[in-house]
Amino acid sequence: MNRLSLNQITTKGWSLPEAVQGCVDAGIPAIGLWRDKVAEVGVERAARLCRDAGLAVSSLCRGGFLTAATADGRRAALADNLQAIEEAAELGTDTLVLVVGGLPEGSRDLAGARRRVADLLAELAPHAGDFGVRLAIEPLHPMFCADRAVVSTLGQALDLAGPHPVEQVGVVVDSYHVWWDPDLAAQIARAGSRIAAYQVCDWTLPLPADALLGRGHVGDGHIDFATLTSQVTAAGYTGWIEVEIFNQEIWDTPGAQTLQTLIERHRAHVAAP
Amino acid sequence: MNRLSLNQITTKGWSLPEAVQGCVDAGIPAIGLWRDKVAEVGVERAARLCRDAGLAVSSLCRGGFLTAATADGRRAALADNLQAIEEAAELGTDTLVLVVGGLPEGSRDLAGARRRVADLLAELAPHAGDFGVRLAIEPLHPMFCADRAVVSTLGQALDLAGPHPVEQVGVVVDSYHVWWDPDLAAQIARAGSRIAAYQVCDWTLPLPADALLGRGHVGDGHIDFATLTSQVTAAGYTGWIEVEIFNQEIWDTPGAQTLQTLIERHRAHVAAP
């Protein structure tokens, strides 16, 4: 329990104050925040709510969307990410999760989009360092490559992080996105102190009509969390384990009940081994 | 046109005789056959129909499903693949496409399933060699890892092929399954003469309710076929370019119309560069 964190998208129906109270009631010691939920109450109040409740903020979701091909799009992305970095610092977390963005509308230039991610990362990393925040590149499942994230593997995320100081740029290991990767064990070992966040949820089938919402509770699907967690631990990661689930059925479940399931599954599949 | 092949799943509504006639009428010089369609007319008649029509058989789909964890399942898979090898030879193709299978029911042992693929490949490869047939390992998109194919990248397929003679075990490059891979260019170059088949269709969004059926005509989606085709060509591949599309809307389209679209798209996106 002492490493468990609720990523607040898992209880999407809850406002930030409700999610904070829910964690307190359930004894969950940390929360991963989303910027839209933070914006509803304001950054300052969100920070105070977490602090007063004794909740750690494990991460802020999310910056990124760095693939714009136009100068305007690039400027907007820089401005938005600079703001996200400041928000993360004010909220008291050192981890800003980056979903890097997909192909620009009508473009088939995947290599170009990937180069632009590297370029903007280089501009953002020193700013993140100034605020004591680490940019955590999240490789997304390859089925989201076209529309959401052109970073598709942990190895690719590590290649992008490589040129930057480890305290400025890290990576996210999210079970749902990387579990299938035949090179995963080697890349987790390689990642070492680059691992900025470990997020969990399960791969369940069939995929729903909206493929974004196919994630299941830990233990309901095909992922071997004992092995994955031991690999992440062996790489030296001792930080928060965030449960991040996009799933309409779980979103329709009362939040307190969802948190009890999180705790049970964490004990059975993640913490125990 | 002289390298274009119709994978007959693209015209799923057609029987084998109809597909053969459709290719002849459209001037498409080759066809990739499916075992269920071949079985409807019998292997001998299917072979004769293609031969008499002057159609090359670019491949047979499919063998594989090699991940069974039980001795019975393993024996059944061996028997079925040996039969598929003989059918390929009788049909006059040297390429048997392998979809290797997903996790067995209830299993989370992905590494174990992958090991069993390697084990059964080693048993099958010499038999394939005896019949002049090459086992073509097809990496499937990672979204099919749990239920359909635990081989998820071209690099992994090449690692599996590596121990075997190049004329016994090769790989399939299917645009839909591999286009997202950040390591793709390097792995295609590495593949060289291991490339046994090049299949094309496009990645289109949104994914449909049945994720298997989300493939689009070349040119309708996000894949850069000019670059991909030039990489496959630079690796030394001069064989058939098979169009293989799973898509209910295309299946509901008259076959002759689908073939005209195939030809137009082939000229515009694949053959031209």
Image (cartoon, coloured by chain):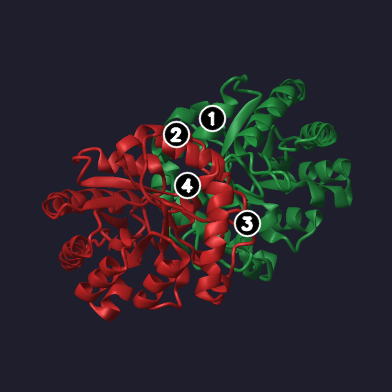
Chain colours: A red, B green
- Res A155 seen here: yes
Instruction: Give percent across and percent down for residue A122.
Output: 17, 48
Distance from Cα at disc 4 to Cα at disc 2:
19 Å
Q: Which residue is mark 1?
A: B158
State the residue in front, A262 or B37.
A262
Mark 4 against mark 3, which lies toward the viewer? 3
- State the image coordinates of residue A21 (x, y, percent, origin top left): 39, 73
* Dot 2: chain letter: B
Q: What SS does tag 1 mark?
A: helix
Distance between the Cα atoms at labels 1 and 3?
A: 32 Å
List x then y, in percent, for residue A219. Answer: 61, 53
Q: How far apart are the alpha carbons under marks 4 and 3?
A: 17 Å
Three-letter amino acid code at disc 3?
Answer: Asp
Query: What residue sits right under mark 3 in the picture?
Result: A220
Q: Are marks 1 and 2 in contact (CB under 8 Å)?
A: yes
Q: CA distance from mark 3 to mark 2?
A: 34 Å
Tally the numbered discs.
4
Label 4 crowd bin: few (<14), some (14–19), many (20+), radius 10 Å: many
